[in-house]
Image (cartoon, rainbow, N blue to C red):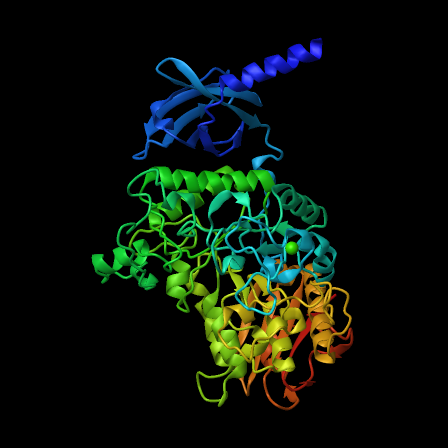
Amino acid sequence: MKKIFLLMALHFASSQFSFSQIQHLEPMNWWVGMKDNSLQLMVNGKDIAYTTPSINYPGVSIKKLTKGDSKNYLFIDLVISSQTQPGTFPIRFTRNGTLVEKYDYTLLKRALAPEAFNGFNSSDVICLITPDRFANGDPGNDIIEGMLENKVNRKVNGARHGGDIRGMINSLDYLKSMGYTAIWPQPLMENNMPAYSYHGYAITDHYKVDPRFGTLDEYKELAQKAKAKGIKLVYDAVLNHIGSGHRWMSDMPFRDWINYSDSMRITTHVRTVNQDPNASQYDRELMTKGWFVPTMPDLNGENPFMATYLIQNNIWWIETLQLGGIRLDTYGYSIKPLLDAWACRIMKEYPNFSLVGEEWSLNPLITSYWQKGKKNPDGYRGCLGSTMDFPLQSALVEALRQKNRNLWGKGLHLLYESMANDFAYADPSKLLIFGDNHDMDRLYTQLGNDLSLTKMAITTLLTLRGIPQVYYGTEVLLENSAHPDDHGYIRADMPGGWANNTSNAFVGSGLTGDQAEMQGHFKQIAQWRKTSKAITNGRTLHFAPFNDVYVYFRYTDNEKVMVVLNRNEQSTSIDPSRFKEIIGNARLAKNVVTGQSLSIQQKFDVPAKTTMVFEIDPVK
Ligand code: CA
């Protein structure tokens, strides 16, 4: 009898609210105790703008209501006082005095203190992963009926291959064993696009994990298991654009939600307008407001509701996953006020967090412009801690592959002079340094499929100042030489990520001798790196290249490491006498690969095409 009564009550309760107008209410939850006590809810549902919401919960008050240009959007500005307790409360929506909708909203307790969100830093080595191409841990999610691209085909380089979050979870022990201390997966948000949905940058729902990658619970599991193994999780965020399949494209909250929504125009990609004192207003507008590509509409960061939506979304992911950093795509394509509001708000909320922006420029004047602490002549002061060191990437590869290297200004001089440009940066130790990424030829390909040069490049990256980032599979020489500059081939499948693979990088089976050598070398240097304060937190002293040999030192008050790059095609004798100012009276230097020591006060030989790393014994 009791049961029947309960069923009747439930039936009554559900029929009372059968309008079910609300399709999306975002963010779906929030937290008490945030430094910024404001929260703006975006409510999306048929005719929702005609309703009036009310809340009765201690500490929470509605400050302002804003109807969208579309009657299907209502924005609710809340204030959450510092005394507010965690809990769930109904938001009641009435129309003409009648209750038409009720939404239970939850404020959670923060899992960590704000200071405990530790971002990546120069003690880390970050693995950049293209999740679709890394490991297929769950073939059951390869095809999701109802999604626009609902097939996998590993033979087609632009198609989905089936890799997923479960694959990354399963690979954490491998990543840890290689010496990685952070992972940066490309975006895992829904990309419901008819083609090329695998790369993740055409987001169609900012709060939904793409089901072909897995579930929110799996993403949380990845975050928790990674953290337990000492691996930070870096989130890949996009503020500049969305995928054209986003629901906003058929019903925008405001008429100015998307730039050039009536007459699609493509960006000029001339990002120098952000710094150029001579730039025309025409170029400035088209650069930041033009669409990235025809399938990626440009978000209007000048609309304050858009800016708040994006910033809150990133904070939601930081709290939900307890992230170890954010990488922001296409930095410089968004307008400066949005970039600053985003970076400053996040860093205010999480003082020890890390943000890195993608500014693809080979000019350190441009890349350094964005970094926090840089005093720019135009008065610009940003909050972004890290930028990507594209200038160093280019210099490193050119330095190693160039012909006529001994001409002045060629070869290793390029690397030396790139490092000399450190004066442009507020903090060079926070630069993200790399040899390749998902948008450029594989490092091995850039270096002409030369194992020795690739080992040189990796050893150098793991010992220079900054935060090394390595693209997955570069440690086993993945290459795209037959398809240069082809993204689909650059983002090749990781050997062993699929059940029928004949070789397996994760367990080291079926690899060629060169692949195994590269993998072993990478692992050895990356693991040793963790033990060296001189590398992870030291200063740099370098000596101008001489006879195709470049020598630099990393040092603290107590430790000294010497790195010698010999690009010659033959073994070369090094005379250490010119390094006296840093070596002092030290007697021995230990090769960190072989463990053998040599007398550092005497000439020594470095093999052809080798980067050697030595720990210099402290003088007792
Ligand atoms: Ca899968």
**How far across and down, in percent of the image, does residue 510 sit?**
76, 74
Q: Is residue 472 visible?
A: yes
Q: Which residue is more in the foreground, 500 or 444?
A: 500
| Snapshot quadrant of residue 78 | top left
**How far across and down, in percent of the image, does residue 49 sit?**
35, 27
**How far across and down, in percent of the image, does residue 410 sit?**
46, 84
Q: What residue is rendered at 75% in x and 79% in y?
A: 598
Q: Which residue is more in the foreground, 143 or 170?
A: 143
**Where is 226 relative to 616, above or below?**
above
Specify the quadrant that holds the C terminus: bottom right
> Which residue lies most toward the top here?
1
Q: What residue is rendered at 69% in x and 83% in y?
A: 602
| Snapshot quadrant of residue 127 | bottom right
Specify the quadrant that holds the N terminus: top right
**How far across and down, in percent of the image, does residue 571 sit?**
66, 89
Q: Is residue 36 visible?
A: no
| Snapshot quadrant of residue 97 | top left
Q: Which residue is more in the foreground, 243 or 201?
A: 243
Q: Quadrant of ligand 1?
A: bottom right
**Where is 609 relative to 88, above or below?**
below
**Where is 166 relative to 557, above or below?**
above
**Count of numbered tags:** 0
